[in-house]
Image (cartoon, helix red, strand yellow):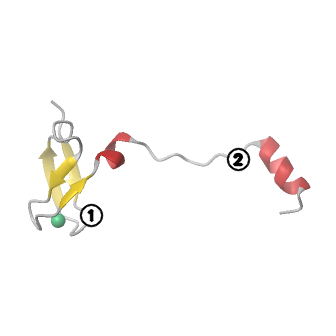
């Protein structure tokens, strides 16, 4: 089973070798004891906004630039 290293959002402590798949993303910080769900962070990748040329044309036509 895969393990994850997650930084606590509250205190920043690095919690290592967490079985997030088993707990559905929930983890308890070993330092401050805060319980947080981090699945959203490790499952989804951050989308990078992409400007398409056609969108850019519309924006320019609307006089926004
Ligand atoms: Zn913590």
Label 1, residues with CA under 10 Å away: few <14, some 14-19, many ≥20: some
In the rendered view, would you say 58 is above or below 14? above
Q: Residue at x 52, y 45 (%)?
A: 47
Q: Which residue is mark 2?
A: 51
Q: Is residue 9 visible in this depiction of the protein? A: yes
Snapshot quadrant of residue 54? top right
Q: Are marks 2 and 1 in contact (CB under 8 Å)?
A: no
User: In the rendered view, does 49 fall on the left or right side of 14?
Assistant: right
Find numbered disc 2 in the image and state the secondary structure of the residue it sits on: loop
Badge 2: residue crowd in 10 Å (few <14, some 14–19, many ≥20): few
- Secondary structure of the residue carrying tag 1 is loop
Question: Which circle, 2 or 1, is nearer the viewer?
Answer: 1
Callout 1: CB less than 8 Å from ligand 1: yes
Looking at the image, which residue is at 22% across and 57% down? 36
Quadrant showing the C terminus = bottom right
Residue 18: quadrant of the picture: top left
- Image vertical order of residue 61 relative to residue 50, above or below: below
Quarter of the image holding residue 11?
Answer: bottom left
Q: Where is mark 1, residue-wise?
A: 9
- Report the side of 59 relative to 48 (left or right): right
Q: Is residue 31 above or below residue 3?
A: below
């Amino acid at each position: 089973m895969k393990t994850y290293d997650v930084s606590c959002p509250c205190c920043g402590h690095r919690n290592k070798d967490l079985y997030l798949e088993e707990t559905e993303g929930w983890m308890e910080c070993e330092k401050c004891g805060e319980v947080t769900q981090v699945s959203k962070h490790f499952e989804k990748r951050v989308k990078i906004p992409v400007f398409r040329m056609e969108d850019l044309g519309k924006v320019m036509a609307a006089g926004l630039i």
